[in-house]
Image: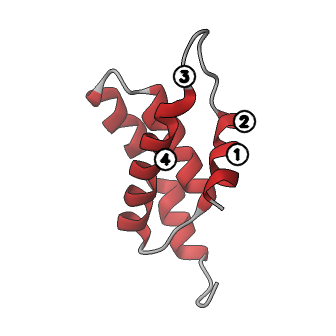
Amino acid sequence: MESNLLDNLKKHIRLEDGMDDSMLSLYLDSAKRYVLKKLGYSQEYLEIMVTSVMFEHRLSSEDLALALQALEPIFALEVLTNEPGE
């Protein structure tokens, strides 16, 4: 499952020329913890979104904070539409 998620992530992130994708695992692990802390459960599409945001805003913590804040409505919608036992 982990490699499948990493493969899906690579489809969503555009690496610049010469960039190594080995750092994506670090961002993915951080995103998984972030999503788990926010929701209380894992959700692959949110993990990909958060990883993408972390990767794109890796140079500015202020921009990263704003970008993650912009995802709050999506997290809220996920919680509201989650069916027990899914």
Instruction: Specify the quadrant that holds the C terminus.
Output: bottom right
* Residue on which disc 4 sits: 28
Calculate the distance from the C-alpha at mark 2 to the C-alpha at mark 3.
14 Å
Binning the other alpha carbons within 10 Å of mark 1 as few (below 14), some (14 to 19) or many (20 upward) gives some
Instruction: Specify the quadrant that holds the N terminus.
Output: bottom right
Residue 80 in the image: state x and y as whole percent.
54, 75
Q: Nearer the viewer, residue 7 or 59?
A: 7
**Nearer-N-terminus badge (4/3):** 3
**Nearer-N-terminus badge (3/1):** 1
* Residue on which disc 2 sits: 11
Q: Is residue 1 left or right of residue 31?
A: right
Give SS at disc 4: helix
Residue 41 in the image: state x and y as whole percent.
48, 74
Q: Amino acid at mark 4?
A: Leu
Please report the residue visible at 27 percent of the width from the left and 29 percent of the height from the top: 62
Calculate the distance from the C-alpha at mark 4 to the C-alpha at mark 2.
14 Å
Q: Amino acid at mark 2?
A: Lys
**Nearer-N-terminus badge (1/4):** 1
Please report the residue visible at 44 percent of the width from the left and 60 percent of the height from the top: 35
Binning the other alpha carbons within 10 Å of mark 2 as few (below 14), some (14 to 19) or many (20 upward) gives few
* Residue on which disc 1 sits: 8
Calculate the distance from the C-alpha at mark 3 to the C-alpha at mark 1.
16 Å
Picture layout, residue 67 above or below residue 72: above
Residue 61 in the image: state x and y as whole percent.
27, 29
Residue 34 in the image: state x and y as whole percent.
38, 56
Residue sticking out furthest to the top = 17
* Residue on which disc 3 sits: 20
Please report the residue visible at 47 percent of the width from the left and 31 percent of the height from the top: 55
